[in-house]
């Protein structure tokens, strides 16, 4: 557990980016697959929602249009909030610069896990229950975290890019360089680290999906609580490290003395 605090540290390394990406891919897969059992839609699948948006416009189906618009705006808002938190943390040179969005995600997931069934009945202007908007916001928030930490090379909430990367690297691995001696510069070589990263993210997303689907099937919404606890384990240590620098702890101590 002690090493978890380094995964959201301000100073990044390829190894910490990969490790954080794998954990977040597991979390995304669990929330996405588990949520499908309840909502019958994948809340990280913005490609599908974008297509649904077009279908709603063409068919004149306002309900279909509003469903897609709500999910897309929620995902977009999550990514935007992540950018605000990360850039604010960078300007203040916080250790928890990447932990803040995950802390917010955990704060949203805890009440969802404890009272998620209630949110299914909460109507919204987008003709979908609050649960859909909440999960889409969380997915946008998390995907932006992984993108920010890795410079855009790691995506954790949808696997299209990772499967594409894996396919391209497999193609290069299987490519037959007929004349490598005469033209070494043009020889095709696969990127082993890129292939391993893509395969690992896909594997963790699928594994998380299995865990999430089983959890929602047999335990219900409460299975989200351990996932939120994982995010807290990643985000709380650097956040606590920043508290003394923020001046909050001295003010709290002074308040107790005056009381």
Image (tube, helix red, strand yellow):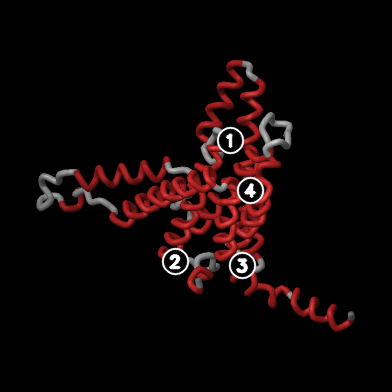
Number of numbered discs visible in the structure rendering: 4
Q: Nearer the viewer, mark 3 or mark 1?
A: 1
N-terminal of the pair, mark 4 or mark 3, is 4
Q: In terms of image quadrants, where is residue 75? A: top right
N-terminal of the pair, mark 3 or mark 2, is 2
- How far is disc 4 from disc 1 in space, using C-alphas? 24 Å
Whole-percent x, y for residue 71 in the image: 62, 36
Residue 255 seen in the current view: yes
N-terminal of the pair, mark 1 or mark 2, is 2
N-terminal of the pair, mark 4 or mark 1, is 1
Q: Which mark is residue 112?
A: none
Residue extending farthest right: 259
- How far is disc 4 from disc 3 in space, using C-alphas? 22 Å
Q: Which mark is residue 39?
A: 1
Q: Secondary structure at mark 2?
A: loop
Q: Secondary structure at mark 3?
A: helix
Q: Which mark is residue 13?
A: 2
In the foreground, 244 or 224? 224
- How far is disc 4 from disc 2 in space, using C-alphas? 24 Å
Q: Which mark is residue 236?
A: 3
How many C-alpha atoms fall within 10 Å of the one at disc 3: few (<14), some, or many (≥20)?
Answer: some
Q: Nearer the viewer, mark 3 or mark 2?
A: 3
N-terminal of the pair, mark 3 or mark 1, is 1
Q: Classify residue 135 as left or right of residue 159.
A: right
Whole-percent x, y for residue 85 in the image: 65, 57
Q: Nearer the viewer, mark 4 or mark 1?
A: 1
- How far is disc 3 from disc 1 in space, using C-alphas? 30 Å
């Amino acid at each position: 557990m002690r090493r978890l605090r380094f995964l959201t540290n301000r100073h990044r390394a390829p190894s910490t980016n990969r490790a954080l990406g794998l954990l977040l891919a597991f979390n995304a897969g669990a929330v996405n697959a588990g949520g499908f059992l309840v909502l019958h839609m994948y809340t990280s699948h913005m490609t599908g929602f974008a297509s649904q948006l077009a279908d709603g416009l063409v068919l004149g189906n306002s309900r279909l249009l509003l469903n897609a618009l709500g999910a897309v705006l929620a995902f977009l808002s999550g990514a935007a909030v992540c950018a605000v938190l990360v850039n604010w943390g960078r300007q203040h040179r916080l250790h928890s610069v990447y932990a803040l969005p995950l802390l917010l995600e955990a704060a949203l997931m805890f009440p969802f896990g404890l009272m998620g069934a209630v949110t299914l009945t909460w109507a919204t202007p987008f003709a979908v229950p609050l649960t859909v908007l909440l999960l889409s916001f969380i997915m946008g928030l998390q995907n932006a975290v992984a993108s920010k930490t890795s410079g855009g090379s790691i995506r954790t909430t949808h696997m299209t890019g990772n499967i594409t990367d894996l396919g391209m690297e497999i193609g290069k691995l299987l490519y037959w360089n007929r004349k490598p001696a005469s033209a070494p510069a043009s020889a095709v070589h696969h990127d082993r680290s890129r292939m391993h990263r893509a395969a690992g993210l896909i594997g963790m997303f699928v594994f998380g999906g299995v865990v999430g689907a089983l959890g929602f099937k047999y335990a219900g919404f409460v299975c989200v609580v351990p996932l939120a606890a994982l995010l807290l384990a990643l985000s709380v240590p650097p956040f606590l490290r920043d508290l003394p620098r923020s001046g909050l702890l001295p003010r709290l101590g002074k308040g107790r003395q005056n009381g």
